[in-house]
Image (cartoon, rainbow, N blue to C red):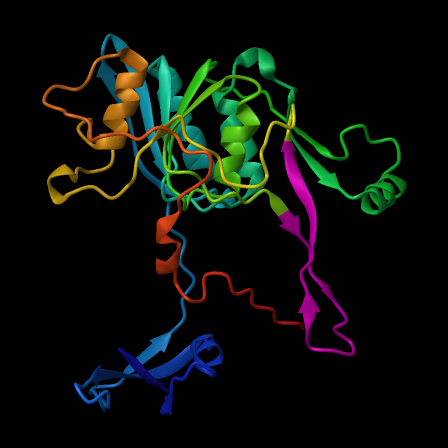
Amino acid sequence: MFYKINNQQLTIHNYSSLLEEEEYKMTLGTLNADKSITPQTPEINLVAEELSTNPILVHKVIHHGGKKIGYLAYTSFIYDYNPELESVFAEFKAAAIDELVLDLRYNGGGAVSTAILMSSMIAPANKTNEIFIRSAYNSNLEDYFKEKNPGNPDLFNDRLMSHVNNLNLNRLVALTTFKTASASEMVMYGLSPHMDVYHIGEPTHGKYYGSITIDDAENHNWAIQPIVMRVENYNNSIDYSHGLIPNELVTDFMDATAFYQLGDIKEDFLARALYHITEELPEGVVLKSASTSPLSPLNKEYKFLHPLNTDMQFQLQ
């Protein structure tokens, strides 16, 4: 267990500030039966390093049931990896895929611009320039932005773009868990007015809102982060009281015999997607029992999230 940082014991009161340093010495400890802690050696020197991980875990073309089906497991909408994302869709287009399965089970969101890029490569070609999402503010902020940006008809709109790698699909099959949030949800509800979006998995997180930072850095070292807007799709068909509810409710926790690599056609979520598309199961696959889609999300694992998951850190310069 983490015991000390720079020789200072971690407590409920100091752990956040101690762990946020960019460089420190950590002492590990062993918890004893009497609840005392024995420090371990050697101590560990840690230095923060910024890493960039390619969010494209798996991409492939699956031939099943007489169809060519693209599969993409994607973990985060990272702008720096847009060229790699476009390259994947170029491969899908060259293969002339008929359908796409987008695996967003472990995608917590990211850059809205990348979500728009991806959606523009998925949507029917005749939907180019259609409204993808709207930013909805209260009347005071809306009037303020209009005053600052006069004569801009798309001030609050983001539209689907023309793209050379557009797949011109009529259906998207999306795989989700409760960790599917923000920009990954946006792809689903932003496309749903324009095409069939079939949803397999768990209810999503339900992150539809945006905030801004307001500070008085010259006089104070604190800031506030008010929610100032929500994202709407073209026909405003979102129920903001909960995450997106699946057509097929399936939990991502299966017994050990059901574990397959992402992209394996025997993996339960992907097998369900293939069955929905072709009405044919992969050979040897028996689907786990599915539940009827609930009216509200279950998200029973929320208690297992990291204790800092909902913390927001500010550093005012």
Outermost residue to the top: 66
Residue 288: % across, % down: 20, 31
Q: Is residue 221 left or right of residue 62?
A: right
Which residue range is magenta in the image? 210-232
Q: Position of residue 282 (x, y in %)?
A: 17, 19
Residue for point 70% across, 45% down: 229
Residue 8 in the image, given as x and y percentages of width and height: 39, 91
Asked whether residue 226 is drawn in magenta, I would say yes
In this rendering, would 58 be left or right of 220? left
Give 167 or 142, whichever is nearer the viewer.
142
* Depicted 300 relative to depicted 193: above or below: below
> What residue lies at 38% left-to-right and 59% top-to-bottom?
303
Residue 250: x and y in percent read: 30, 34
Q: Is residue 309 above or below residue 57?
A: below
Q: Looking at the rendering, which quadrant does residue 292 occupy?
A: top left
Q: Identify which residue, 119 or 164, lies in the foreground.
A: 119
Image quarter for residue 158? top right
149 vs 314, left or right, is: right
